[in-house]
Image: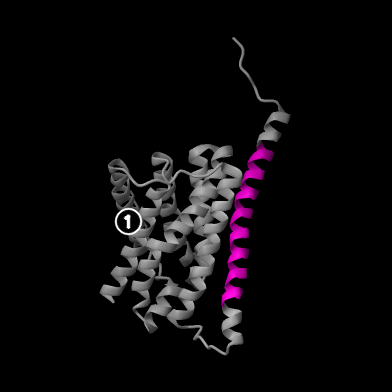
């Protein structure tokens, strides 16, 4: 009885392919970020040229800065999905899909709840976010962000991170590896949403990794991008509206 053993050249080729897949995944996100900057300049330069002043600490500035970046995420996600993956599966959720939406919401909040409880045990101080600072000035921004989460943020980010990035990584690493890597990229990008640094940032970033993993798992199970979009949108909207109601 003989056992097949991979040759060094085969292992090297496999590692090269894996490294290439990660580089491509990161490049996809970088391309989306660059396009977002370009679109943001395209929006704000005419406003500045027309002497229209916008308070950089206000809710209007935050929303105006958010929309171009999300548009860039969606455009790059769609282009990559078509060019590299032959498209992504998006359809109206079935009754079974809706059960996964409910399970995804429960899983997302449970994961975050456990992490928050753990951070309380080790006595980590809460971290501040850019959105939280803006909401202190104008709480109604939370309502606007809840609506944007459902109709703009969730579709755009899921197209990019689950549709394009996770889809590309799946071809090399399989579903589990793709979920882990895509979730890590998703979480690391959101570091800039928080004020401060050090170990305290690990709590919200880890929470985002876990939530991203839930989105990714649901996408793999349902093979319908509309399902993680729904979970993502409702999850964000619940957080924003809860903050608005509770003050």
Q: Horizontal and vertical percent for residue 168? A: 57, 44
Whether residue 12 sits left or right of residue 156 in the image: it is right
Main secondary structure of the magenta stretch = helix
Q: Residues within 10 Å of mark 1 (few under 14, many from 20)?
A: some
Q: Does any portion of residue 181 appear in the rendered image?
A: no
Which residue is at 32% across, 53% downward? 105
Which residue is at 39% across, 56% downward? 232
Q: Horizontal and vertical percent for residue 19? A: 65, 44
Name the outermost residue toward the right: 9
Which of these two is toward me, 116 or 104? 104
Which residue is at 48% across, 83% downward? 57
Which residue is at 47% across, 60% downward? 205
Please name the residue that numbered disc 1 is placed on. Answer: 109
Would you say residue 53 sits in the magenta stretch? Answer: no
How many marks overall?
1
Whether residue 128 sits left or right of residue 110 in the image: it is right
Q: Horizontal and vertical percent for residue 201? A: 48, 65
Which of these two is toward me, 20 or 96? 96
Q: Relative to residue 97, is residue 135 depicted above or below?
A: below
Q: Quadrant of the N terminus?
A: top right
Instruction: Kindly indicate the quadrant of the structure image that contains residue 37.
Output: bottom right
Would you say residue 42 sits in the magenta stretch? Answer: yes
Which span of residues is magenta-colored? 15-43
């Amino acid at each position: 009885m003989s056992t097949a053993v991979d040759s060094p050249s085969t292992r090297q080729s496999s590692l090269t392919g894996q490294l290439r897949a990660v580089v491509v995944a990161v490049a996809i996100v970088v391309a989306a970020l660059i396009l977002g900057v370009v679109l943001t300049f395209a929006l704000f330069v005419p406003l500045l040229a027309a002497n229209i002043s916008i308070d950089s600490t206000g809710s209007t500035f935050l929303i105006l800065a958010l929309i171009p970046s999300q548009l860039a995420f969606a455009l790059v996600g769609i282009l990559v999905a078509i060019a590299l993956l032959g498209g992504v599966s998006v359809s109206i959720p079935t009754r079974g899909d809706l059960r996964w939406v409910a399970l995804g919401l429960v899983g997302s909040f449970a994961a975050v709840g456990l992490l928050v409880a753990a951070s309380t045990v080790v006595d980590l101080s809460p971290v501040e976010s850019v959105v939280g600072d803006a909401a202190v000035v104008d709480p109604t921004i939370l309502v606007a962000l809840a609506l944007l989460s459902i109709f703009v943020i969730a579709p755009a980010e899921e197209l990019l991170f689950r549709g394009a990035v996770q889809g590309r990584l799946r071809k090399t690493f399989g579903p589990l590896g793709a979920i882990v890597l895509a979730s890590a990229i998703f979480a690391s990008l959101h570091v800039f949403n928080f004020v401060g640094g050090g170990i305290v940032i690990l709590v919200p970033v880890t929470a985002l990794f876990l939530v991203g993993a839930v989105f990714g798992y649901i996408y793999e199970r349902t093979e319908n991008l509309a399902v993680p979009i729904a979970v993502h949108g409702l999850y964000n909207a619940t957080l924003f509206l809860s903050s608005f109601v509770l003050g």
